[in-house]
Image: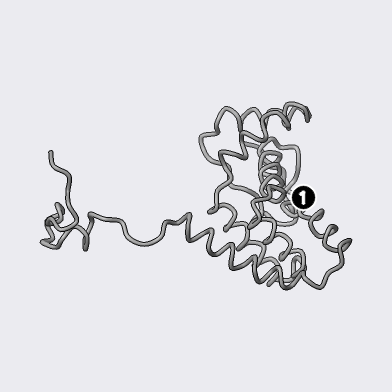
Amino acid sequence: MAKLSRNDPCPCGSGRKAKRCCGTPRGPSERSLARAELSHRADAAASMLASLGRREAVDLFYELAHLPAVDLTLVMRLPTPLSPELDRLIDALADDDPDAAKRVLPGVIAKLDTPELRLRLARALAALAEAGKISDELAAAGLIDLCAESQALVRASLLEAAALAAGVVRTPGGLRLAA
């Protein structure tokens, strides 16, 4: 069967050319849009942090590891069904086995860390700062972390989600969840 050309009539029956109808996806991908928005947000955040001293900046970036415990919007949504690696991470946290968790964590992050996830976290940071739940500077540090391909906030978000699924930590509202 011949490949559909852009100028052929669309097979949906609309009578339009395929390039103007169903045949050709147009525009940037969701991944490209997410990267562009992250970059834009990080540029604005960098100017906010430019006046900070080194120690203040280091302290802000250190706080990123604790941010997902502040609000559930900063906790990664775990995919269903769980992958075997993610299941092992949850089991390691439930069994209080940090060595096993360290072994599987890089593989789980590699599969779940996407520009779309980072953008969702960036938007959540901005909303929390706007609501006054976190400082503008801490939100800015988080945005820079997310755009810089660092894994600090993504790792913290994943670990909080896995710990919640394992039932070893409580939500910010005090509930204990378990999958």
Number of disc labels: 1
Q: On the image, which quarter does residue 143 sit in?
A: bottom right
Q: Residue 174: horizontal and vertical position, in percent?
A: 76, 50
- According to the image, label 1 marks what residue? 65
Q: Is residue 24 above or below residue 97?
A: below
Q: Quadrant of the C terminus?
A: top right
Q: Residue at x 55, y 33 (%)?
A: 82
Q: Residue 62: horizontal and vertical position, in percent?
A: 82, 53
Q: Nearer the viewer, residue 2 or 12?
A: 2
Q: Residue furthest right?
A: 55
Q: On the image, which quarter does residue 24 sit in?
A: bottom left
Q: Residue at x 64, y 51 (%)?
A: 149
Horizontal placement of 78 versus 93: left or right? Answer: left
Horizontal placement of 81 versus 172: left or right? Answer: left
Q: Residue at x 51, y 34 (%)?
A: 81
Quick one: SS at disc 1?
A: helix
Q: Is residue 89 above or below residue 115?
A: above
Q: Residue at x 53, y 63 (%)?
A: 36
Q: Is residue 93 above or below residue 50?
A: above
Q: Residue 158: horizontal and vertical position, in percent?
A: 66, 43
Amino acid type, callout 1: Ala
